[in-house]
């Protein structure tokens, strides 16, 4: 399989997840992600371990998109390449629009997609964003919640 095939697979997953996010369709969105899922931004790194972790992040991003009146998510696959027959490395750029207007500056993302059990899923995502963006804020809130939970466990021991 060549990199043209890798790009088609990546573009299909980007289309499915983008459409699902804008429609609020968590089930379709979740089916495209491998758990545990490593996710990072410039400010935070975490692992989404459960469907509930993924749902929380999805809902926070979706809420922010609704607040910002995002009507379209244009994602351009800049490059996709097979690392091995079951792993694709992908770089794409996201453009968020409200009608004909940009909501934020375009931002890059680097993902790893893995083929498991006959299905391609995103297994890790790195976003070049900060806490002022939808993904950055959702990840920041998730990381803070995990820290609070770990503190409670330590304090109860």
Image (tube, rainbow, N blue to C red):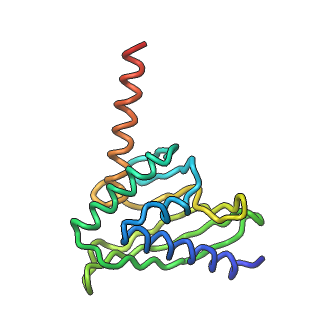
Residue appearing at x 46%, y 52% in the figure:
40
Q: Is residue 154 above or below residue 131?
A: above
Q: Nearer the viewer, residue 118 or 111?
A: 118
Q: Is residue 150 above or below residue 110?
A: above
Q: Quadrant of the N terminus?
A: bottom right
Residue appearing at x 46%, y 74% in the figure:
93
83 with respect to 142 (left or right):
right
Where does residue 71 sit, x and y in percent of width and height?
A: 30, 78
Where does residue 121 sit, x and y in percent of width and height?
A: 61, 62
Q: Is residue 34 above or below residue 69?
A: above
User: Quadrant of residue 66 in the image?
Assistant: bottom left
Residue appearing at x 37%, y 58% in the figure:
135
Q: Nearer the viewer, residue 153 or 43?
A: 153
Question: Which residue is farthest bottom?
Answer: 100
Q: Quadrant of the C terminus?
A: top left
Question: Which residue is farthest top?
Answer: 157
15 with respect to 80 (left or right):
left
5 with respect to 68 (left or right):
right
User: Quadrant of residue 63 in the image?
Assistant: bottom left
Where does residue 85 sit, x and y in percent of width and height?
A: 77, 66
Where does residue 95 sit, x and y in percent of width and height?
A: 37, 76
| Total numbered circles | 0
């Amino acid at each position: 399989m060549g990199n043209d095939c890798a790009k088609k697979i990546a573009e299909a997953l980007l289309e499915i997840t983008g459409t699902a996010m804008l429609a609020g369709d968590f089930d379709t969105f979740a089916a495209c992600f491998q758990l545990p899922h490593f996710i990072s931004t410039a400010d935070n790194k975490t692992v989404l371990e459960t469907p509930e972790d993924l749902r929380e992040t999805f809902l926070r991003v979706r809420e922010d998109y609704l607040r910002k009146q995002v009507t379209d998510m244009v994602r351009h696959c800049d490059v996709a390449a097979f690392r091995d027959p079951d792993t694709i490395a992908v770089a794409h750029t996201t453009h968020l629009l409200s009608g004909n207007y940009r909501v934020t500056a375009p931002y890059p993302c680097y993902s790893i997609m893995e083929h498991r059990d006959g299905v391609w899923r995103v297994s890790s995502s790195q976003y070049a964003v900060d806490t002022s963006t939808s993904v950055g804020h959702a990840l920041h809130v998730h990381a803070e919640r995990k820290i609070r939970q770990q503190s409670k466990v330590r304090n109860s021991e």
